């Protein structure tokens, strides 16, 4: 899954840009609304927000606010947001996943990135101004022109990260405006009975067969880290939803594509407090948590809404509370005296769960074998049906979901499927809808980026295919993306090396000829948890690579208005065997779907790259072939045999450039791990 794509598809961007050809770039195109005429021209998709804005401004008046900021997140800084937390969408009418709204007594504005400009124009009425920028600076700059000196800007502190709060507060304070913490969310007050209900589905415990350790063992491990910490924390406060889900081996269905439930945890050296809706726990689950006792391995389930009061009360004692600042809201942060805080970028739970033990590794590998079966079935189905002209991007995505749904332990998609044909594939963030999609054609490239949630693992795999005759440039671009995937996957590097230190290997073959891609190269992945599991990956904010981590490797190339290519595999970080002593790491790819032979220019592959590719194909045969045969999927087995035949070398480079790339990358990036 392209790491730059965090959320829903820009469905209307496709409609306006590509259904009408390929006109001016988005930032040059005029707003599809015309608010200057009377009555104004608005698309039929625009939402009338007059009533909600009037009600919100009444609340702002009561609280003596000149402006109110409505961000696009929840209290846990989640990547995906449940319907219950879609405040910005309700107040603006704009349903894109990224955007910040600001309301003053006279104006209402939305800031979002280029993925969503057209969608925002078509969903927002003339109450709203669209600003084609993102970040704190443009919002603060606008505020300073709209509100007077001494004005107060209100926010819900539970919807702001610590860094976001401090960024806004400092910028406003310098200009004699004040950022004010309003713990009661004003949008919630005016949303009222129209707001979707609080999720009520059961919170359940995973079967032991699907967990790497018991929750008691995990708690003991975190407490051990507390005891060894130089600052002697007495408690760890967990705010990210996947932290609590992982710690107790519990799952829910509150968040799209993620098996989480609204929760916090306060783990102390002698008690465990889980904040969630207790009515959603069965008696068996409460018994599983030992909730009826009061010892150090008994989980006291308290109401979700009590977390603030409980944290504040605990912080009044002689304590030290350890937090991860990336996922802790400012609302909780401000309740704890600074001298009683121990701050790290990521909590010990977030860092610990990033390294999978041997059982977790086995589970994740198994999920990828079954997932490969589903994807291969889909690719076979496409080969038969696309030439008949009966498949479109959306119906294809539905068919893949059907195949995955037939796999054991399946629990839904891990994100919204990218099923993109031709020029749509050039949009790295694109997903089709029932109303808006293109037909798949044998004459165009097709990019499929999808994944599944299984009880034993989360999957994410991208393949790009062409059923007809690709152009020479398409083959070259595809092969260079493949080379980048191979070169990073087979890289040997010192233990504790930062992902950003080796990321250039995925880009080198593209850079050589003046090509590149604009998204990240990979992200961590969980065991029936996040498809984007922090803090693993190849960005500067990721932690160093360690044995037992899983990461995606996903280089790509996109030619605007024509086609897009991405090849993504999930890989396990393993210990490498080297000629000389030392602790070195490499990757073991666990995604098991063949690449498209029709798009590979073998002459561009070095002998080492070709050897690696053929060895990978042999592994696919050994792991997926028997599963296809066991299930009597003979057509799919024959397809697999054909698509994993060893590739033979043709004229081209025969010497690996890896040593040269290593020297160049280290010289550019500096050697720090």
Image: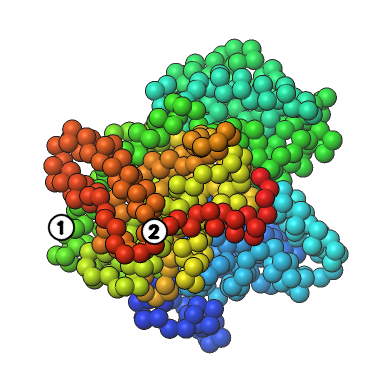
Q: Helix, strand, or loop for circle 2?
A: loop
Q: Helix, strand, or loop for circle 1?
A: helix
Circle 2/circle 1 CB separation < 8 Å: no
Q: How far is the residue under mark 2 from the one under mark 1?
A: 37 Å
Residue visible at 40% across and 81% down? 22
Give x and y (percent) for residue 91. 56, 61
In which image quadrant can residue 231 be found? top right
The label on residue 654 is 2
CA neighbours of label 2 inside 10 A, class few (<14), some (14 to 19), many (20+): some
Instruction: Judge whether residue 279 can be spotted in this image.
Output: no
Image quadrant containing the C terminus: top right
Colouring convention used in this rendered image of the protein: rainbow
On screen, residue 173 versus residue 526, left or right, reads right
**Number of numbered callouts drawn:** 2
Relative vertical location of residue 227 with respect to residue 157 in this rendering, above or below: above
Residue visible at 32% across and 44% down? 615
Q: Nearer the viewer, residue 377 or 569?
A: 569
Relative vertical location of residue 192 with respect to residue 474 in this rendering, above or below: above
Residue visible at 39% across and 62% down? 653
First-in-chain label (2 vs 1):
1
Q: Nearer the viewer, residue 481 or 492?
A: 492
Instruction: Judge whether residue 236 can be spotted in this image.
Output: yes
Give x and y (percent) for residue 251. 46, 32
* Residue position marked by numbered label 1 in the rendering: 384
Q: Nearer the viewer, residue 330 or 545?
A: 545
């Amino acid at each position: 899954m392209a790491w730059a794509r965090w959320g829903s598809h820009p469905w209307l961007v496709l409609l306006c840009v590509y259904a009408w050809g390929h006109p001016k770039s988005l930032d040059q195109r005029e707003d599809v609304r015309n608010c200057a005429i009377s009555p104004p021209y608005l698309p039929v998709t625009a939402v009338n927000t007059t009533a909600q804005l009037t009600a919100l401004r009444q609340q702002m008046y009561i609280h003596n606010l000149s402006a109110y900021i409505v961000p696009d997140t929840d209290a846990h800084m989640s990547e995906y947001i449940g319907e219950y937390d879609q405040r910005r969408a309700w107040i603006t009418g704009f349903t894109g996943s990224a955007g910040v709204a600001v309301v003053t007594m006279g104006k209402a504005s939305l800031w979002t990135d280029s993925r969503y400009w057209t969608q925002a124009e078509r969903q927002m009425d003339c109450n709203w101004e669209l600003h084609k920028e993102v970040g704190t600076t443009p919002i603060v700059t606008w505020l300073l022109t709209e509100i007077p000196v001494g004005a107060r800007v209100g926010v819900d502190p539970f919807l702001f990260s610590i860094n976001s709060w401090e960024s806004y507060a400092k910028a406003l304070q310098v200009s004699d405006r004040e950022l004010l913490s309003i713990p009661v969310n004003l949008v919630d007050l005016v949303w009222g009975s129209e707001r979707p209900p609080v999720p009520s589905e059961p919170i359940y415990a995973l079967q032991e067969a699907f967990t790497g350790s018991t929750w008691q063992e995990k708690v003991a491990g975190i407490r051990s880290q507390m005891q060894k910490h130089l600052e002697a924390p007495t408690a760890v406060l967990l705010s990210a939803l996947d932290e609590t889900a992982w710690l107790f081996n519990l799952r829910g269905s509150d968040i799209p594509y993620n098996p989480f439930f609204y929760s916090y945890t306060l783990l102390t050296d002698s008690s465990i407090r889980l904040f969630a809706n207790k009515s959603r726990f069965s008696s068996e689950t409460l018994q599983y948590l030992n909730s009826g006792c009061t010892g150090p391995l008994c989980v006291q389930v308290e109401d979700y809404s009590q977390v603030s009061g409980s944290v504040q009360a605990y912080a009044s004692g002689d304590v030290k509370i350890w937090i991860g600042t990336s996922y802790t809201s400012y609302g909780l942060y401000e309740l704890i005296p600074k001298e009683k805080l121990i701050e790290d970028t990521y909590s010990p739970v977030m860092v610990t769960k990033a390294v999978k033990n041997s059982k977790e590794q086995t589970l994740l590998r198994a999920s990828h074998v079954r997932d490969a079966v589903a994807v291969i079935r889909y690719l076979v189905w496409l080969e038969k049906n696309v030439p008949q002209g009966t498949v479109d991007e959306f119906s294809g995505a539905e068919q893949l979901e059907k195949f995955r749904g037939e796999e054991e332990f399946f629990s839904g998609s891990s994100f919204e499927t990218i099923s993109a044909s031709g020029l749509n594939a050039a949009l790295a963030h694109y997903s089709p809808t029932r109303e808006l999609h293109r037909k798949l054609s044998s004459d165009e490239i097709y990019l499929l980026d999808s994944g599944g949630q299984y009880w034993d693992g989360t999957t994410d795999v991208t393949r790009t295919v062409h059923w007809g005759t690709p152009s020479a440039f398409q083959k070259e671009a595809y092969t260079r993306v493949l080379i980048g995937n191979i070169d990073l996957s087979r890289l040997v590097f010192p233990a504790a090396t930062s992902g950003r230190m080796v990321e250039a290997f995925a880009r080198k073959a593209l850079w050589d000829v003046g090509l590149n891609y604009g998204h990240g190269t990979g992200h961590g992945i969980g065991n029936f948890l996040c498809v984007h599991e922090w803090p693993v990956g190849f960005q500067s904010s990721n932690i160093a690579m360690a044995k037992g981590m899983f990461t995606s490797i996903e280089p790509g190339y996109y030619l605007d208005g024509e086609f897009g290519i991405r090849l993504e595999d999930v890989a396990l970080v393993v210990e490498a065997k080297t000629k000389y002593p030392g602790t070195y790491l490499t990757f073991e790819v666990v995604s098991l779907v063949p690449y498209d032979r029709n798009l590979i220019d073998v002459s561009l592959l070095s002998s080492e790259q070709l050897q690696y590719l053929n060895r990978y194909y042999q592994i696919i045969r050994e792991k997926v072939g028997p599963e296809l045969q066991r299930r009597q999927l003979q057509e799919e087995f024959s397809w697999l045999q054909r698509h994993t035949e060893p590739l033979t070398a043709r004229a081209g480079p025969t010497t690996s450039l890896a040593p040269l790339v290593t020297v160049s990358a280290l010289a550019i990036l500096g050697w720090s791990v």
